[in-house]
Image (spheres, rainbow, N blue to C red):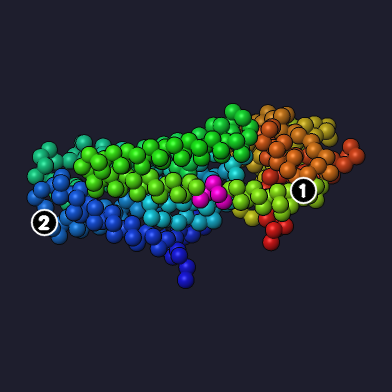
Amino acid sequence: MRASIKLLTIRGIPVEINASWLIAFALITWTFSTVAFPANFLLWSRGEYWLAGAVTTFLLFASVLAHELGHSFVALSQGLKVHSITLLLFGGVSRIEGDATRPRNDIFIALAGPAVSLTIGALLVGWWAAFGPERQFQVTPLHGVLIFTGLMNILVGVFNLLPGYPLDGGRVLRSAVWALTGDTERASRVAFAVGRLVFFLLIAWGGWRIVNGDVFGGVWVVFIGWFLLSSARGERAAQKRLGAVAIEGGMDFAVGVVARPMPPTVDVSTTVSAAMATGLPSGHGDDFPVAVVPVAREDALIGFVTAQELRDVPVESRNEVNVGQVVDSGSLRVISAYEPVREGLQMMDRHRVVQLVVIDGGLVVGVVTRQDILARMIEARG
């Protein structure tokens, strides 16, 4: 029996709900209906409390889906593949294949979700401030649903910006450390360490609230902190297992084993529009497996541009801007075909590139990307 049920597909992305979502729906509806709404809106009937609680919970989960779609749409725009979105007990998760090519791009993906939540919240709270009733007894269940949905979206957006991995703020922290050090493993260690501290503090705060008489609110805070701490530990353990698999199961094979033939080069004088017209890697299949374009000057390779860098050039400028103006000379890094792929990954991290030129005896034999190495590693483990 599957733990998740497919609901619909949006832009080719399957949207699923985990079985835990049903538990969360019941708990949150009960909280709204018996605690939050009765404490703030005194004149509603019991049925109105429960109806408003169920509708608000539904809108909250719809907002979580919008939050995850924010992440996913930005990832798609960068050529990454999104396998699915799953709604869980608290929040959701977007399964995105591959890594962003730059820390900056990773930050954009991470911030897209909170940006969606804060926008929804600002619109609903702004509507309330402008058009909501002036007196509490005039607040209808519809008003209550909209204002609570807005406030919860603001809470979700702000909470997700806490610097605790796997929250979005933790991903931003990881990307910032990656940008400063060029070391993705070190960045992950820092982000997870800060995340543990944040979640322990959250649990401690919940305990303090319980001791001071707010048992209900304190238990919720402790539970959320524990859930996030467990999620962080699970994700970090998975990363470590992947690293162990890499070392034990195939990280000692040579770079030349996974090198691909060099894609056709484009001359520095080629306009961006002409380069794109030749067909760019999409990141959504195997038709264009190498997401980089080699650039040459008088048949001499000078660097690479990624498909995303070409797409970033404004449409109205693509006929005037040539690839020579886009290419980064620092993107040209060379490695021997006989070096272990572990060294290749470390070189990519040090120089913040996603591809290396592979040479054998002074001759270029191909190009290798991070995705090539990881795919070969997984294949080696079966």
The residue positioned 46% from the left and 40% from the top of the image is: 196
Percent position of residue 133, x then y: 14, 41
The residue positioned 10% from the left and 45% from the top of the image is: 138
Q: Is mark 1 on a helix, strand or loop?
A: loop
Percent position of residue 141, x then y: 17, 51
Give the mark nearest the N terminus, 1 or 2.
2
Left/right placement of residue 255 relative to residue 222 reads right
- Which of the pair 360/327 is nearer the observer? 360
Give, as a single range, the part of the protein colored magenta: 234-238
Q: Residue furthest bottom?
A: 1
Q: Which kind of residue does numbered mark 1 sit on? A: Asp
Q: Which residue lies furthest to the front in this view?
A: 211
Q: Is residue 377 visible in the rendered structure shown here?
A: yes
Marking on residue 252 = 1
Marking on residue 45 = 2
Percent position of residue 262, x then y: 79, 45
Q: How far apart are marks 1 and 2 (CA)?
A: 68 Å
Q: Which kind of residue does numbered mark 2 sit on? A: Ser
Q: For residue 128, what is the image quadrant?
A: top left
Dominant SS of magenta comes to helix
Left/right placement of residue 32 relative to residue 230 reads left
Q: Residue furthest right?
A: 361
- Which of the pair 320/252 is nearer the observer? 252
